[in-house]
Image: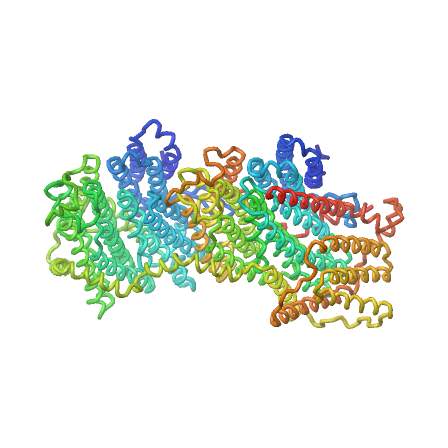
């Protein structure tokens, strides 16, 4: 048993990669594929729960791939990493179950399961790696797997392949530039410090800074990571790919992209900026605050102008990520805790909203909200789910989003960031406006008749579709009514972030062969 | 059962049963409303169970831990104020839910209706008993949301949706400002606990002297005004009348709109006794009172008249709570509290009457109504009692609280001195005059005068007892409170006033109190009121003319403009910031990169470029570089794909040459392989597409792109020049480890190979996955293309 615990980090990456290969071989047995993949996802979820508990009880876990110490690649499971793994495992299980009914059978049995597993491997690998270049490699996996998954078709085919291609093209180009920037940054660091291990880099930089010999170009490298991770998280002005990509993906993939994938960028900033560049934070924080506010503003205003429900949700994701970055930019223990709480709540609520919007689109046969109306009669489940999500995103009690916004504003005000909080507050009002307007537009008003163009009506919403939505909605409410465990966890994560010494010790005080 | 448990059950019982209402509907069927009323009655009785202690001057406080790490607890604070609004919420709740059994037809979705009513009632009770600001905010927003749901109860009607949206936007957003106010308040006090402030006079002084005093007060007042439809935020309440009439009676006259007034009363001990409090609270109050009273004269819909009248009456309370001086902070508190109670009785009663009239006569238009007193005598009597109470006619309860309003106005005016000793009483009388006029209009327009036969059904009669008794009960209260004021004063107003002023208060209110200045003002009010009523139509017409002449002098005009055009403007904004072409996006990203990288240049650096650069360059290296530059330029400038591709691969081959110079033969080999393969693939693809790509690039665009490209290259160049200065001492490269250990530990002679397959084999696994992914992705793409065809 002890052995399995030790190997959890690598298993969380290796199993999905292995499954990707197995799924290709099982192409002719779609049923078996479905069962196997859901089982594996459940196992991964259980393992990630186990990992988080293990890390919580026993401190940071380090796994040496090939036992080369800091000269090879290390996997490090600290509270941040393992919590992110848990979050992504939970949401991906929901998205996977939803996919079984939503994705076209043809696409589902041929490549979908493999790609999905590789995406999970990419996510877990990114969250668990302790090596900067290895993170780059897993970023590539994430990028390509998400590109490929965006192209796969949902039933009904409400998005033209040409639109998907256009979106994917932009996504690829902009992220390739991001990759190059990351490569330049990693290479420059390696050339200066001679190591790729993040803990090692951190130790060396802090030693240099204490002796006053920190080369100034490290201050040029630090902002490059904001470009890299900001691009992944779609903060202004690097958000342009998101409103095209998230809507054109099939809904379970939109849920993954908006729920988890953009959080990879947040994770990156937290990991790299706070572990490696604590000395450059005085430069980075104002940059992040400024970009975060611009992101909130641009995302929220653009969201108001949308008729397409998924595009509205996509712009809303941009704006909400701005809130998360605002907390990070303010950079105190309180605000980072608030940001983490915000991150989790947004991940759950937004993925639930995207799953819901998928069913809504099937139900109405269109993505255009102006052509919808009165669906509360025919799709009561979707109506309640969307309302719960909308309330959470707008920060209304008793949903999880309220606790998140409350904590963020509270922390910001306590740390006397009055103007950023005022701007954030004003745009929270706009959030309320666009989320509720969307809900009203779709569910209230004259009931429309969708029989002629809808694929199926609400009566035959399958369990595959409704169960994930119900579970996620329940989580949104639960996090609003009793947020204590999440807040305690976030506080512990923040402590680890602000004091990286335990992380460094866990990594570097290991014998090298 | 202790008092705390009783209050908690009173709060959450409605929530629990709201959840169980759907299954219970199978048992109760049409009678579900009676069940809901019973739940409300239990809540009422539980509050009544607690009330005696409070009336005797006790205060119940209890705290349960909720989310301690965020500093939030669930805590109860029961004083006179909480008990009074709790009584009103649950008591009127019982009345409304009983009445609804007659009002709502059985075809309606009754479960949903009563669910929201119960949820609202629970939230309202929860709010008034909250001891901390966050809990108060949570229940506050819940009342906003349930109100939104109830206004939009008939959700297929566009006006309902409009009214519901408006109310949600204004009240819920106002709530967010209030939250900000609470958060700021916490920075002074250190906790969200309100009771801690009440117990600590020193803390109250600290708050009053703090820099943030005014911002906090303004934020809280925005919340209160938005909720209670005061100042410019009044606009949502008239549109909220789209709700079923019992809902209007319950939420939009008796309870929910009182939440803002409740907030004012709750924070009164903290903020009153300052100029800011008087100017802001009374200022908003007086202006709203006059404006809403005046606008009420123009309305033709009975519910609209009642809505404007509610706004105006709430403004009375605002005004009175605002009366304050440093020495006597609570001049108007008792009067305001009494009026709050009285207004709940007579206004809810009037709404119920309006519901009866709509139910029986099928119209709410006062122009189409008239002469109904013969057919509906009981309704007529009830309506007259309530309306006359609103007009302030003795011996009804409205007369008493209006007298108190006048008294306190005189007192406040005289304390301020000239010209306020005339101005404030005069404005108060003017407010009373409008109230008198529209109150009379309600009786006259509906029940007296000529019956408009063409608009009305042939047979109109008094409704069933289910609808009549609740209204009659309220009318009875109106008379009772008027004739025997000591009952409400002693049991409700005194404890409440004591709760607000944080000291024991004894009041003496009598129906006949001699020829006081206040009575003179009342008489003036009646005379002027009759005069205004005689010119009622002229005033309404003048308002209509003014409104059509100057449509832009109206808050609604701006609200509608803002909300209706929001989507278009935002859409234009979205198109402007996101035009669609990839080039803009790349530029934006690169410009951001340059800016972020240049900032450290100004803040941190001393030397831009390292001093010890080596400018000696062997001829062959120089030549290779030169070829690279030429090839790169060719690739960028040439218009034919074939040549561009070959030039690009030329750059790649030259890079591999440099690798060879740098003694990295395996790297060079890999580079050559990659270059060759990609060139072949490129060539295979471009034979299928047009051979030239001639796009017109305007000179300005070209110049811009050139600038960006140059700037990017220069910043990266500066970075790389510094980075390639070698590993900073005292650190050294990890390559010595690889050199030493490759053979003994990994058993390989080729270090690069060992790094790839062993030291960093995990990376290689990742890269292999990337290749598989690319293959799968292309396969996926081809498949989905086939499906389309």
Q: Position of residue A310 (x, y in %)?
A: 51, 48
User: As rendered, which of B78 and A139 lies closer to the eye?
Assistant: A139
User: As rendered, which of A492 and A259 lies closer to the eye?
Assistant: A259
Q: Is residue B525 visible?
A: no
Give the side of residue B408 with respect to residue B43, left or right: left
Q: Position of residue B38 (x, y in %)?
A: 29, 33
Give the side of residue B641 with respect to residue B737, left or right: left
Give the side of residue B745 with respect to residue B397, left or right: right
| Residue at figure coordinates x 51%, y 51% from the top left | A311
| Residue at figure coordinates x 68%, y 36% from the top left | A23
Colour option used: rainbow
Dividing the picture into quadrants, the one containing residue A210 is: bottom right
Give the side of residue B20 with respect to residue B460, left or right: right
Point out the image quarter for the N terminus of chain B.
top left
Q: Is residue A56 visible?
A: yes
User: As rendered, which of A164 and B284 lies closer to the eye?
Assistant: A164
Q: How many marks?
A: 0
| Residue at figure coordinates x 84%, y 67% from the top left | B621
Vertical relation: B623 (above or below) A461: below
Q: Position of residue A395 (x, y in %)?
A: 46, 49
Q: Position of residue A150 (x, y in %)?
A: 60, 46
User: As rendered, which of B660 and B486 lies closer to the eye?
Assistant: B660
């Amino acid at each position: 048993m002890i052995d399995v615990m030790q190997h959890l980090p690598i298993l969380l990456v290796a199993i999905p990669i292995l499954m990707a290969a197995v799924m290709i071989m099982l192409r002719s047995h779609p049923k078996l594929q479905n069962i196997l993949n859901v089982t594996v996802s459940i196992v991964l979820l259980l393992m990630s729960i186990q990992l988080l508990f293990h890390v919580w009880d026993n401190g940071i876990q380090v796994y040496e791939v090939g036992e080369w110490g800091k000269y090879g690649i290390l996997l490090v499971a600290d509270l941040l990493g393992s919590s992110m793994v848990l979050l992504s495992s939970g949401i991906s299980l929901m998205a996977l179950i939803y996919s079984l009914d939503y994705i076209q059978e043809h696409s589902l049995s041929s490549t979908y399961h493999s790609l999905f597993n590789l995406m999970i491997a990419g996510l877990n690998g990114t969250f668990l790696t302790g090596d900067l270049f290895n993170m780059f490699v897993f970023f590539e996996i994430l990028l390509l797997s998400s590109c490929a998954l965006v192209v796969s078709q949902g039933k009904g085919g409400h998005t033209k392949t040409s639109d998907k291609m256009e979106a994917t093209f932009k996504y690829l180009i902009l992220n390739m530039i991001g990759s190059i920037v990351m490569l330049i940054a990693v290479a420059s660091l390696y050339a200066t410090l001679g190591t790729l291990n993040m803990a090692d880099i951190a130790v060396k930089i802090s030693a240099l800074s204490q002796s006053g010999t920190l080369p100034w170009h490290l201050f040029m490298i630090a902002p490059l990571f904001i470009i890299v991770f900001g691009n992944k998280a779609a903060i202004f002005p690097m958000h342009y790919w998101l409103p095209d990509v998230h809507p054109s993906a099939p809904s379970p993939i939109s849920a993954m992209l908006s729920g988890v994938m953009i959080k990879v960028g947040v994770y990156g900033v937290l990991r790299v900026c706070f572990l490696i560049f604590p000395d450059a934070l005085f430069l980075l924080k104002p940059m992040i605050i400024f970009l975060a506010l611009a992101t909130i503003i641009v995302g929220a205003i653009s969201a108001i102008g949308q008729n397409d429900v998924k595009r509205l949700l996509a712009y809303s994701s941009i704006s909400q990520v701005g809130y998360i970055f605002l907390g990070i930019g303010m950079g105190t223990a309180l605000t980072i805790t608030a940001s983490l709480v915000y991150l989790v709540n947004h991940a759950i609520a937004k993925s639930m909203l995207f799953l819901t919007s998928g069913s809504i689109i099937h139900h109405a046969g269109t993505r255009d909200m102006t052509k919808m109306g009165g669906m509360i009669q025919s799709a009561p489940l979707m109506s309640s789910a969307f309302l719960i999500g909308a309330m959470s995103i707008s920060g209304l009690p008793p949903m999880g989003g309220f606790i998140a916004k409350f904590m963020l504003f509270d922390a910001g005000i306590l740390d006397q960031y009055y103007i950023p909080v005022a701007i954030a507050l004003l745009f929270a009002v706009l959030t309320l406006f666009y989320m509720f307007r969307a809900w009203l537009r779709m569910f209230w008003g004259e009931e429309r008749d969708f029989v002629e163009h809808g694929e199926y009506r609400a009566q035959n919403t399958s369990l595959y579709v409704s169960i994930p939505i119900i579970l996620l909605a329940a989580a949104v409410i639960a996090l609003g009514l009793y947020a204590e465990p999440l807040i305690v966890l976030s506080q512990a994560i923040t402590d680890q972030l602000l004091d990286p010494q335990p992380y460094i010790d866990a990594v570097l005080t290991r014998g090298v062969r | 059962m202790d008092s705390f448990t009783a209050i908690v059950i009173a709060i959450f019982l409605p929530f629990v049963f709201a959840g169980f209402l759907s299954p219970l509907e199978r048992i109760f069927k049409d009678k579900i409303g009676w069940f809901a009323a019973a739940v409300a009655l239990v809540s009422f009785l539980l509050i009544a169970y607690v009330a005696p202690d409070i009336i005797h001057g006790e205060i119940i406080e209890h705290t349960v831990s909720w989310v301690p790490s965020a500093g939030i607890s669930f805590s109860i604070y029961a004083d006179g104020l909480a008990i009074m609004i709790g009584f009103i919420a649950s008591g009127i709740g019982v009345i409304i839910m009983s009445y609804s059994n007659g009002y709502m037809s059985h075809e309606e979705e009754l479960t949903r209706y009563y669910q929201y009513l119960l949820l609202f009632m629970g939230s309202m009770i929860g709010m008034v008993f909250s001891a901390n600001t966050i809990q108060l905010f949570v229940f506050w927003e819940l009342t906003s949301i349930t109100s939104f749901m109830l206004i939009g109860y008939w959700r297929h009607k566009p006006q309902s949706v409009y009214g519901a949206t408006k109310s949600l936007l204004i009240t819920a957003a106002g709530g967010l400002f209030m939250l900000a106010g609470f958060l700021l308040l916490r920075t002074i006090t250190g906790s969200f606990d309100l009771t801690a402030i009440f117990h600590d006079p020193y803390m109250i002084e600290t708050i009053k002297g703090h820099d943030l005093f005014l911002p906090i007060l303004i934020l809280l007042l925005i919340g209160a005004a938005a909720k209670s439809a005061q100042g410019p935020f009044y606009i949502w309440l008239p549109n909220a009348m789209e709700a079923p009439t019992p809902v209007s009676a319950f939420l939009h006259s008796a309870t929910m709109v009182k939440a803002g007034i409740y907030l004012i009363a709750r924070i009164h001990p903290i903020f009153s006794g300052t100029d800011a409090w008087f100017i802001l609270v009374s200022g908003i109050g007086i202006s709203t009172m006059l404006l809403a009273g005046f606008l009420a004269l123009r309305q033709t819909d009975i519910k609209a008249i009642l809505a404007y009248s509610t706004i105006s009456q709430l403004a009375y309370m605002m005004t009175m709570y605002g009366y304050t001086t440093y020495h006597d902070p609570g001049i108007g508190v008792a009067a305001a509290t009494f009026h709050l109670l009285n207004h709940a009785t007579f206004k809810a009663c009037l709404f119920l009457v309006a519901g009866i009239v709509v139910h029986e006569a099928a119209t709410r238009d006062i122009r189409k109504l008239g002469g109904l007193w013969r057919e509906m005598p009981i309704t007529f009597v009830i309506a007259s009692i309530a309306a006359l109470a609103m007009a302030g006619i003795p011996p009804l309860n409205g007369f008493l609280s209006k007298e108190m309003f006048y008294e306190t106005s005189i007192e406040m005016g005289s304390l301020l001195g000239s010209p306020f000793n005339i101005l404030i009483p005069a404005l108060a009388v003017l407010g009373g005059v409008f109230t008198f006029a529209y109150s009379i209009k309600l009786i006259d327009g509906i029940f007296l005068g000529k019956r408009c036969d063409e608009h009305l059904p042939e047979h109109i009669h008094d409704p069933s007892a289910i609808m009549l008794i609740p209204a009659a009960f309220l009318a009875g209260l109106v008379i009772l409170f008027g004739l025997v004021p000591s009952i409400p004063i002693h049991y409700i107003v005194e404890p409440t006033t004591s709760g607000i002023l944080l000291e024991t208060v004894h009041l003496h209110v009598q129906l006949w109190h001699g020829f006081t200045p206040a009575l003179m003002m009342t008489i003036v009010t009646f005379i002027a009121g009759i005069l205004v009523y005689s010119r009622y139509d002229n005033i309404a017409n003048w308002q209509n003319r003014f409104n059509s002449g100057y449509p832009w002098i109206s808050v609604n005009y701006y609200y509608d403009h803002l909300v209706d055009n929001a989507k278009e403007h935002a859409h234009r904004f979205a198109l402007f910031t996101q035009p669609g072409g990839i080039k803009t996006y790349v530029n934006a990203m690169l410009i951001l990169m340059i800016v972020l990288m240049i900032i450290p240049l100004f803040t941190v650096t001393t030397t831009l470029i390292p001093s010890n650069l080596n400018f000696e360059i062997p001829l062959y290296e120089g030549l290779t570089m030169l070829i690279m530059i030429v090839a790169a330029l060719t690739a960028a400038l040439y218009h034919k794909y074939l040549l561009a591709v070959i030039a690009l691969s030329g750059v790649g081959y030259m890079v591999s040459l440099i690798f060879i110079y740098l003694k990295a033969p395996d790297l060079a080999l890999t580079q050559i392989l990659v270059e060759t393969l990609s060139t072949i693939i490129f060539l295979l693809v471009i034979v299928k597409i047009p051979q030239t790509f001639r796009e017109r690039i305007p000179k300005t665009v070209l110049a811009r792109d050139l600038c960006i490209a140059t700037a990017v290259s220069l910043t990266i160049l500066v970075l790389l020049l510094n980075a390639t200065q070698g590993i900073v001492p005292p650190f050294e490269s990890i390559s010595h480890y690889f050199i030493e250990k490759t053979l003994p530990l990994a058993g390989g002679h080729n270090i690069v190979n060992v790094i790839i397959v062993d030291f960093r084999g995990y990376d290689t696994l990742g890269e292999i996955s990337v290749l598989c992914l690319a293959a799968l992705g292309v396969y996926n793409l081809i498949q989905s293309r086939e499906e389309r065809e």
